[in-house]
Image (cartoon, grey):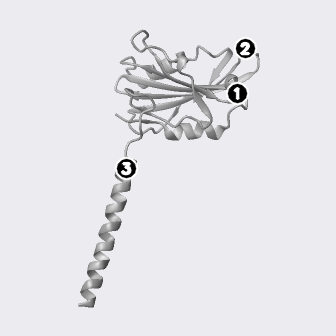
Amino acid sequence: MPGRVARVNGFTRVLLAVTALTSVAACMGTPDPLVNGYPLALDPPPEWVEVPEDRQDPDEVDAPVIYAAQPEKTPEDAALVVQVFFGQASSVPHAINLADGTRHESGQNYERAEPTELDVDGAEDARRLDYTYTCPDSDTACSGTAFALLAEEDLYVVRVSMREDAVAPETVERLAESLELTG
C-alpha cells in the first residue's frame, strides 16, 4: 500500500504542477491594448508620460494620433506617437509610403535606411524604418524609428523621434519587442 500512496502522491504533484502552469499561462494571455478600442499593445518607455492633448479625434481625421508620450524629465528631447490609418494600406510598399509620410515633424535633410522586416505577433506584416534628420527648432541632429504594422488594410504606425543621444538604443529595442496586435 505505501507504494500505491507514493504513486498517487507523485501523480497528484504532477497534476498540480501542470494545473498551476496552465493557470499562469492563461493569466498572462494577450496583453492589454495601449488604447481602448484599438488592438495595439506596447510597453511605453519607463519614465515617459502620456500627452493626451496630442491625441486627435478619430472621427475628424483619416489617420488619428491615438497615443502620444514624452520623457517626463526632458519632454523636448523625444516623442512617441501612435497613428492609425483605417482601411488605407493595401500592401507593404503602400504601408511603408504611408508610414514614411507621417514624418511631418521631421526637419530638413531627411534620410531613411531601407525598411527591415519585423516579427510582430498579430500583424500580417511589419517593417521598421530608421531615419535621421535635422531638428527644425535647433539645427541639431535628430533621429527616429517608425514601426509600420499591417493588419488587413489597417496600418498602425508607432514612431519614436529624438534628439541625438536623447534616448538609449535599448529603449527603442524594448519598444519593438513589446509590439503586438491583439485582435
Q: Secondary structure at mark 1?
A: loop
Q: Residues within 10 Å of mark 1 (few under 14, many from 20)?
A: few
Q: Which residue does the image show at 69% across and 22% down from the upper left?
A: 76
Q: Which residue does the image show at 34% across and 26% down from the upper left?
A: 152
Which label lies toward us, 3 or 2?
Answer: 3
In the rendered view, tell whether residue 72 sits above or below residue 103.
below
Q: Which mark is residue 74?
A: 1
Residue 118 screen position, x and y as percent:
49, 36
Which label lies toward us, 2 or 1?
Answer: 1
Which amino acid lies under the numbered mark 2 shown in the image of this protein?
Asp
Residue 77 left/right relative to 16: right
Q: Residue furthest top?
A: 60
Which amino acid lies under the numbered mark 3 shown in the image of this protein?
Cys
According to the picture, the residue beneath numbered tag 2 turns out to be 137
> Could you tell me how far apart the alpha carbons at marks 1 and 3 are, in whole angstroms?
36 Å
In the rendered view, tell whether residue 28 sits above or below residue 99.
below
Lower position in the chain sequence, tag 1 or tag 3: 3
Q: Which residue does the image show at 41% across and 15% down from the upper left?
A: 58
Q: Secondary structure at mark 3?
A: helix
Toward which corner of the image does residue 30 lie, by quadrant?
top left
Quadrant holding the N terminus: bottom left
Residue situated in front as seen by the camera: 5 or 152: 5
Lower position in the chain sequence, tag 3 or tag 2: 3
Residue situated in front as seen by the camera: 141 or 23: 23
Residue 23 screen position, x and y as percent:
34, 56
Toward which corner of the image does residue 34 lie, by quadrant?
top left
> Could you tell me how far apart the alpha carbons at marks 2 and 1 are, in whole angstroms?
15 Å
Q: Which mark is residue 161?
A: none
> How many marks can you see?
3
Q: Which mark is residue 27?
A: 3
Is residue 120 visible in this depiction of the protein?
yes
Residue situated in front as seen by the camera: 74 or 133: 74
